[in-house]
Image (spheres, rainbow, N blue to C red):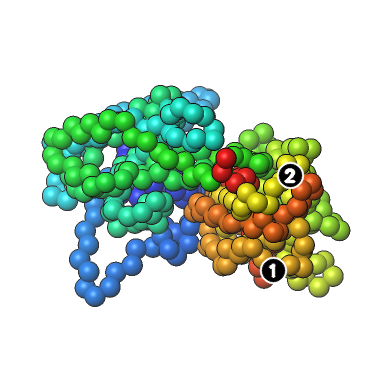
Amino acid sequence: MITASNEFRNEGPTKQDLTSHTGPACLSMFHSAHYAGIELCPQFRNGEAWRKAFGPVFIYLNSKPGGTDVRALWDDAEQRMLAEVNAWPYAWPSSSDFAKAKHRGQVSGRLLVHDKYATDKLRSGTDAFIGLAMLGEKGSWQKESKGYQFWTQADKKGYFTISNVRAGTYDLYGWVPGVVGDYIREGDPISVKAGDDILLGGLTFEAPRYGPTAWEIGYPDRIGSGYIPDPNPKYVNKLFLNFEKYRQYGLWARYAELYPTSDLVYTVGRSDWTKDWFFAHVARRNDADGTYKATTWQIKFSLPNFDASLGVYKFRMAIATSHQAAVQVKVNDPASSAVFDTVLIGRDNAVARHGIHGIYVLFEADIPASSLIKGDNTIYLTQRRASGPFNGVMYDYLRLEAPPS
């Protein structure tokens, strides 16, 4: 099943979807809410008019002489896929809703990143994902289904070209691996007309930042951070023993097995997030009656130079995926009032579907100086929704920022 362009699909380059069913059956999903939830389904009201061209999709049936290694079929299909991609947009569709090459344009530029507490200079938006989508706000492309989206990945120096863009009016969006948060180009929308070659020049992504980093956990790439445990031997899928271990069945149940009596405790400066941070913050199952209860993770850290007169600290919490979850943040006293609560978030269902990312959300919370002390401190993260095994979040990246200096 070969699709030369994903421009008609929803949720942009991060969209995960089904490619097969048991049977076997190959699938080509145009729109779906998988790994995202009902928010990704387009809604129409009051006679709203809507048109969109889906596809074309190429069903490629290939064959090789008997005795040929099966891999040869895959390699042949891959070469055919590359040929179809290079032939896009096709010249032969007769539908007037399908835009031919002469009705399209392209947009080029360079993305730079400014983070004053990481470096004094602008740096390249290395490997940035850059895309054009319907007008919106930061990150809105994730839940956009009615229009077309056009994405590319920048080179090591942040240069990018988005080719074969249908005529229309768009906002420019993006994100950079290693940088928390979303980018959107400020100013007027970008209007693309047939034959346009639009040069945007240098663009600057002002990375979300309040003050210097006190500590951080994970790597900001929109994928769940932490270690993925070995599966229960009863449910091992041999296809995923050496890569994409998150595809194994039943990993959510491993949390209670690895932490049978108490929840995860992470000590900054001593713990290693690749080994000591479980990849999914899920509820705990009570084997006695089959019920579930909330779990509270602790992050222990020291502030040897803490000065309350400098003001609040900023806690950033980037979530790679969530499902019917709510994370509550408390500081130093688990019985105290929460300094922040996400309230109910997410219908991604990534844990159950063996995924590791869904709809990305970035939260920030002010931690009052009165909640902190000089020396040892603790942040408590409680995933307080516990109606079943799949309530939970996967953290992309956590960072505590000290007051500006």
Q: Residue at x 39, y 63 (%)?
A: 41
**Spot occupied by residue 54 in the image (x, y as percentages of width and height):** 28, 51
Which residue is nearer to you in this view: 263 or 102?
263
Q: What SS does tag 2 mark?
A: strand
Furthest-front residue in view? Answer: 309
| Amino acid beneath label 2 | Leu
Q: What SS does tag 1 mark?
A: loop
Q: Residue at x 49, y 36 (%)?
A: 115
Which residue is nearer to you in this view: 314 or 245?
314
Q: Can residue 109 be seen in this view?
A: yes
**Spot occupied by residue 386 in the image (x, y as percentages of width and height):** 68, 68
Q: Which of the labelled discs sits on residue 303, or is there none? A: 2
Density class for disc 1 (Cα within 10 Å; few <14, some 14-19, many ≥20) is few
Q: Which residue is drawn at 17% across and 51% down?
A: 97
Q: In this view, does 259 lie to the left or right of 202?
A: right
> Which of the 4 quarters of the picture holds residue 389?
bottom right
| Amino acid beneath label 1 | Ser
Which residue is nearer to you in this view: 286 or 226?
226
Q: Is residue 390 visible?
A: no
Q: Is residue 39 left or right of residue 316?
A: left
**Spot occupied by residue 35 in the image (x, y as percentages of width and height):** 51, 55
Q: Mark 1 points at which residue?
A: 337
